[in-house]
Amino acid sequence: MKKVMTVMMSVISIAIAFVVFPIITDATHNLLTDQETATVASVTTLDGTYTATVQDEVYKDDIKNVTVTSSVNTDVPVVSSVSGKSISISGLNTSVQTRTLTIKYDTAALNEYTGLSAIISIAPLLVFVVIFLGMFAGSWAVFRNNS
């Protein structure tokens, strides 16, 4: 009976770990970043692309940390590359003369705290390891007492 309970506890622990892990990683990202918004008015383009320069560097130069919206309904703005403060945007309608782009991007939030971002970055992994160590330690204790 104890072995069955151990297996059930293991399965439940694994399920809890996989449910909690995305919540922890999202919270970690929110701790590590601040969201900034830049508005670029009177944007013109000849070839459907535009390179915007924002005030702060994009967090880890990651495209998924940047979203762009346009005042022109026929535009489908897509971030094609990010390098520091430079954001390349494609998918802009060439027949429209001017538009206003709104760029939302993540920046590093913990620059003034040396080493804190490294600690927070590994926090999800540490939580995951602790959950599994607790699960294995509990299983080992049940099997050891069962012998």
Image (cartoon, grey):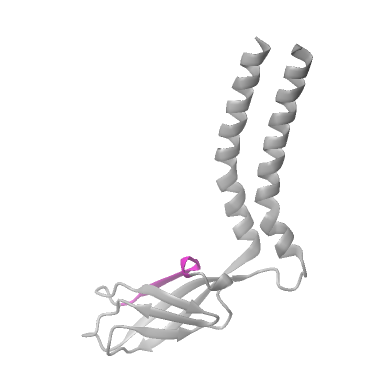
Q: Is residue 111 magenta?
A: no
| Picture quadrant of residue 15 | top right
Percent across and percent down for residue 65 are: 50, 67
In which quadrant will I find the C terminus? top right
Front-most of 103 and 79?
Answer: 79
Q: Is residue 64 left or right of residue 1?
A: left
Percent across and percent down for residue 51 are: 42, 85
> What residue appears at the point 62 percent right and 48 percent down from the top-left corner?
24
Q: Is residue 95 left or right of residue 141?
A: left
In which quadrant will I find the N terminus? top right
> What residue appears at the point 77 percent right and 22 percent down from the top-left corner?
141
Residue range (magenta): 63-71
> What residue appears at the point 69 percent right and 44 percent down from the top-left corner?
127
Question: Is residue 23 depicted above or below 141 in this figure?
Answer: below
Q: Which residue is situated farthest in the front direction here?
A: 147
> What residue appears at the point 45 percent right and 84 percent down from the top-left corner?
52
Q: Is residue 66 magenta?
A: yes
Q: Is residue 110 left or right of residue 90?
A: right
| Picture quadrant of residue 129 | top right
Q: Which residue is situated farthest in the left direction here?
A: 95
Picture mark count: 0
| Picture quadrant of residue 93 | bottom left
Question: Is residue 27 depicted above or below 100 in this figure?
Answer: above
